[in-house]
Amino acid sequence: MRRPTFRSTMCVLTALGLVTSVGLATASSASADPVARPDRDPQPTVVLVHGAFADSSSWNPVVAKLQRLGYPVLAAANPLRGLTTDSQYLASVMATVDGPVVLVGHSYGGAVITNAATGNANVKALVYIAAFALDQGESLASISAQFPDSDLGASILPRPYPGGTDLYIRPDLFRSAFAADLPRATTDVMAATQPAPSHIHAHPP
């Protein structure tokens, strides 16, 4: 998938502006109360979650912009081992973060942040950047089935190994459908190293 762009960054910053403005409004109204706590609420930690066929370094430009604005940032390494496993992993990462959290998901990462945020009171906002935003009862499969002409399925190449199967990208179709603007050497590396998330992953116990 393409790296998050300037527009993606602006989506994140807009969401953060809303979260921050709510905090400032609360602090402003509280300041009129002489017994109110004088210190401001802490800046939320922005947790960035990449999609399939990518890694956490795809967020590097966004991380730099947010850090310059003073936000704590964490680009989580989405394992891409299936939605349940990935969501549990992200939830465990968030458990190490003190204070409010803004979760940002790109592509498949949108489904991951939706699940991982469940029951976590520290999550103050979810930001979806060209991402799956699943409603209750929906799945990645049911959403993908609504678009039978998508090239995504044709781009997947199964790679069996003892005890299971991983899914990778067919370099030719992936390049033409999703990453024609990237150098061929880059897309070949992505195809060779980035497994796609799938519920059919099977691993030895």
Image: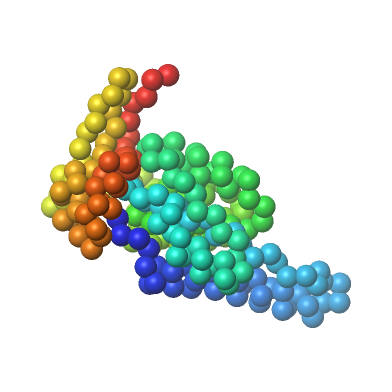
Q: Residue 176 or 185: which is nearer the viewer?
A: 185
Residue 72 location, x and y as percent? 60, 61
Residue beneath the point at 43% across and 54% down: 57
Q: Residue 41 or 7: which is nearer the viewer?
A: 7
Against 158, is 133 above or below? below
Is residue 46 among what the camera can see?
yes
Find the residue positioned furthest to the right. 35
Residue beneath the point at 69% across and 73% down: 26
Find the residue positioned furthest to the left. 149
Residue beneath the point at 63% across and 50% down: 97
Res 29 → quadrant? bottom right
Residue beneath the point at 44% across and 36% down: 85
In the rendered image, the quadrant that contains the N terminus is bottom left
Against 155, is 100 above or below? below
Against 191, is 202 above or below? above
Find the residue positioned furthest to the front. 185
Residue 116 location, x and y as percent? 49, 46
Residue 24 location, x and y as percent? 66, 75
Decide if residue 131 is on the left or right side of residue 29: left
